[in-house]
Image (spheres, coloured by chain):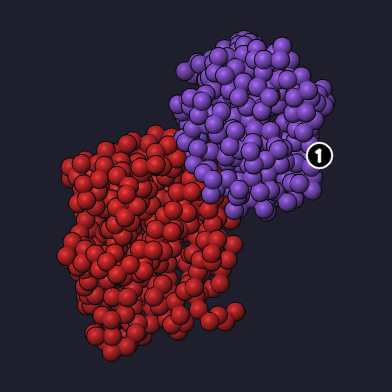
Chain colours: A red, B purple
Amino acid sequence: MARNSYRTGPDEKGKFGIYGGQYVSETLMPALHAVGKAYQEAMKDPAYLAKLDELNRTYIGRPSPLYYAERLTEHLGGAKIYLKREELNHTGAHKINHAIGQVLLALRMGKTRIIAETGAGQHGVATATVAARFGLKCTIFMGTVDMERQKPNVFRMRLLGAEVKPVTSGSATLKDAMNDALRDWVTNVHDTFYIIGTAAGPHPYPMMVRDFQCVIGREVREQILEAEGRLPDSLVACIGGGSNALGLIHPFLDDTDIAAYCVEASGHGVDTDKNAASIAGGSPGILHGNRTYLLQDDDGQIQEAHSISAGLDYPGIGPEHVWLHETGRVTYVSATDDEALEAFQLCTLKEGIIPALESSHALAYVTKLAPTLPKDHLMVVNLSGRGDKDIFTVASALGAEV
Amino acid sequence: MSRLQPCFAALKAKNEAAFVTYIQAGDPSLEVSSQILHGMPAAGASIIELGMPFSDPAADGPAIDKAAQRALKAGASMKQTLQMVRDFRKGNDNTPIVLMGYFNPVYRYGIDKFCADASEAGVDGLIIVDLPPEEDAELRIPAAERNIDVIRLATPTSDDARLPTVLNGASGFVYYVAVAGTTGSKSAATSEIAEAVGRIKASTDLPVAVGFGIRTPEQAAAVASVADGAVVGTAIIEIIEKNIEADGTVRPGLAEEVLDFTRNLADGVKSVRVEGKGNTL
């Protein structure tokens, strides 16, 4: 169906079609309304926006470069590939973009304590960083499985003064960390701001996180015009909850001749029970405050996700992505653990850039897609994070000693 | 009309508060859980909340979280929970049963089919903790057509601006969550509870039951003196938990111990308001 715009969501109830919403306990409803109101006011406040802009430039280091990946392009022999270098941001990933925006909101609301969940640790590090920067108490919830595979980030968070609370319930990964963060929030809602780490959760978080991340796509628009004199033909990003992907693609959604590909993590494969591909293998359901697609069984019990990348190891996806999938505007594909590992090595060797395992899923799809396209096809790939944190996981997968 | 209205009316006539117990369906096994459920009315439960196990109970504390995981591991499912209610109704047509849990298993079951099956099984009410008033119409309306009340929750954060939203469309009773937190957390002072219940009752004719943080017969009695009902969940679940060996085997006599504990709590609730000294909220 032709639409006037793909960029008007969510509606006043926080819905993208039937997805999204506010499925939380009654105790949290006034808090969500307060966050929504504070956000709307902030976005109209020139002082808030100026502060955000200043921190984006001087603290995060924005704009991040748009880099022509010459050797990767030559190697794949098709589309001209540009990498949006979000891994060069302060703290090494795109997560800082929404962490800064949200911490400024927390300060505006007079909150003195910050909580967050984290999977790969990138959002936890970003949150601990902004909490340190503004002198706020900070508690990060992290599954014990993730703490084991992301040890360097656990130590970074502790160095930054955050308390890292190990989460042992369920599969001890990202979804369980989010359960515990919600449990903390409902208990400490009077003084605590919950910085959610992706474009999911109850309204207004999916919208708010997306908006803070859209700085990525807005910069790409200017940068590609500068470099090539025209807009790109395609955009590629990895997707767990979907914040870096929305940040890249949302500013281009109404340029309907630009193809957008979001790459889910299919772990051992979408036809196995070890994957994290909610679009490919999930069905509609309600978890963590929003209606979305979930990996679940016939009884509505949430299944454990699997991905080699801790940041994509989540059995759900942001609600706006489900809507973009169902409308057909964005194409959702997937890459396996093995494909991501291969792309990780390829990018490292060809470009001298060690990508995060998350971003390696996007690169894995690029290695399939780019060779099928003409040389004048402009492709922008979001290099959402750097891979230093992943070297132990990669070494173990490759059977190497570190 | 569900069984809830006549239940509260009958208790009011006796100047008694409702004693509401909570257990998780299928915890620690279908057999033991059914035994407890069947024994609850005789142990003094006026209303039974039966938890529908969910893998990710983000509004619950560790005790109920573990109970859900135990039940799921033992094979609990929505079908089994409804069957427990059906079996209970063969011997009891008076005690209201309220299913309590999270929206996803209900949504996945299919809302219309769930309402039909729950009604046929003998369910009187639903408490869906992650379905606030803004989102509950899609369940509340089909449930009402089957005479099932969707119970609204009021909390310490339900201020004067929020309360009308909570009460508009409420039926059955209002569940006042006495503390901002998860189940099994700290207890609120009776004076705070009395103030909140009074505030809610000023805006609704529905009975107000209070839960969260009630662990002893004394606390249950205190709440019963200022509200229409006292809900106890975690303290009961903890009896189950401590009767399970490290290897998962259930100690004999678990159901009896749970029912004895329930009886003590019920005595606490019924100890107040007798001989006209009760609060007539």
- For disc 1, the marked residue is B1
Where disc 1 sits, the SS reads: loop
Q: Residue at x 39, y 75 (%)?
A: A251
Q: Quadrant of the C terminus of chain A?
A: top left
Question: In the rendered picture of this protein, how many numbered marks are placed on residues?
Answer: 1
Q: Is residue B188 left or right of residue A348?
A: right
Question: Residue pushed farthest bottom?
Answer: A229
Query: Which picture quadrant has residue A381?
Result: bottom left
Above or below: residue A214 compared with residue B154:
below
Q: Residue at x 57, y 82 (%)?
A: A2
Taking depth in this image into account, of B82 and B264 the one nearest to the observer is: B264
Taking depth in this image into account, of B271 and A355 the one nearest to the observer is: B271
- Residue B22 visible within the image: no
Q: Residue at x 65, y 22 (%)?
A: B279
- Residue A15 visible within the image: yes
Residue A271 percent coordinates (x, y) = 52, 55
Residue A169 percent coordinates (x, y) = 43, 35
Residue A392 percent coordinates (x, y) = 24, 47
Residue B75 percent coordinates (x, y) = 62, 32
Taking depth in this image into account, of A396 and B30 the one nearest to the observer is: B30
Above or below: residue A121 compared with residue A212:
above
Q: Residue at x 25, y 45 (%)?
A: A136
Q: Amino acid at mark 1?
A: Met
Q: Chain of mark 1?
A: B
Q: Is residue A102 left or right of residue B245?
A: left
Q: Quadrant of the N terminus of chain A?
A: bottom right
